[in-house]
Image (cartoon, rainbow, N blue to C red):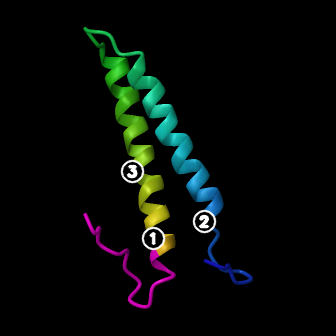
Amino acid sequence: MPEQAGGPVLGPTLDEWIKARDETKRHLATAAPPVDEPWVQRLSDLLTTERSWQDQYTQLIALGRSDGRFPSSNR
């Protein structure tokens, strides 16, 4: 999607979303039972960050549609 001057920029948001997903994946890879409370809190924080970035990314994509909504999946 071509970006207009002063319009939304997807690149930085997508980069941060991917970064949050990678950080969550790395954190999950270190899990070994029993997981302690600080580990669970860190995972909760990472998942919240990932969800926030995902929401921002989908909102930016939706700006390119005439109805302003993110399309539903074809799967």
Residue 59 lies in what quarter of the image?
bottom left
User: Residue 57, position in %: x, y?
Assistant: 49, 63
Q: Is residue 53 above or below residue 31?
A: below
> Where does label 1 land, which residue?
59
- Extreme residue toward the bottom, this view: 66
Q: What distance separates the C-alpha of mark 1 from that of mark 3?
A: 12 Å
Q: Earlier in the sequence, mark 1 or mark 3?
A: 3
Mark 3 secondary-structure assignment: helix
Q: Is residue 42 above or below residue 62?
A: above
User: Residue 20, position in %: x, y?
Assistant: 51, 41
Q: Is residue 5 above or below residue 10?
A: below
* Residue type indicated by callout 1: Gln
* Disc number lying in front (2 or 3): 2
**Segment colored magenta:** 62-75
> Where does label 2 land, which residue?
10
Asked if residue 42 is among those painted magenta in the image, a careful observer would answer no
Mark 2 secondary-structure assignment: helix
Asked if residue 68 is among those painted magenta in the image, a careful observer would answer yes
* Residue type indicated by callout 2: Leu
User: Residue 60, position in %: x, y?
Assistant: 51, 71
User: Are the residues tagged 1 and 3 within 8 Å (C-beta)?
Assistant: no
Neighbourhood count class around disc 2 (C-alpha, 10 Å): few under 14, some 14–19, many 20 upward: some
Question: Which residue is painted at 64% across and 60% down in the image?
Answer: 11
Q: What distance separates the C-alpha of mark 2 from that of mark 3?
A: 16 Å
Question: Which residue is painted at 56% across and 56% down in the image?
Answer: 14
User: Are the residues tagged 1 and 2 within 8 Å (C-beta)?
Assistant: no
* Residue type indicated by callout 3: Arg
- Horizontal relation, residue 30 to residue 74: left or right: right
Mark 1 secondary-structure assignment: helix
Looking at the rendering, in which quadrant would you find the N terminus?
A: bottom right
- Between 4 and 46, the residue placed more toward the observer is 4
> Where does label 3 land, which residue?
51
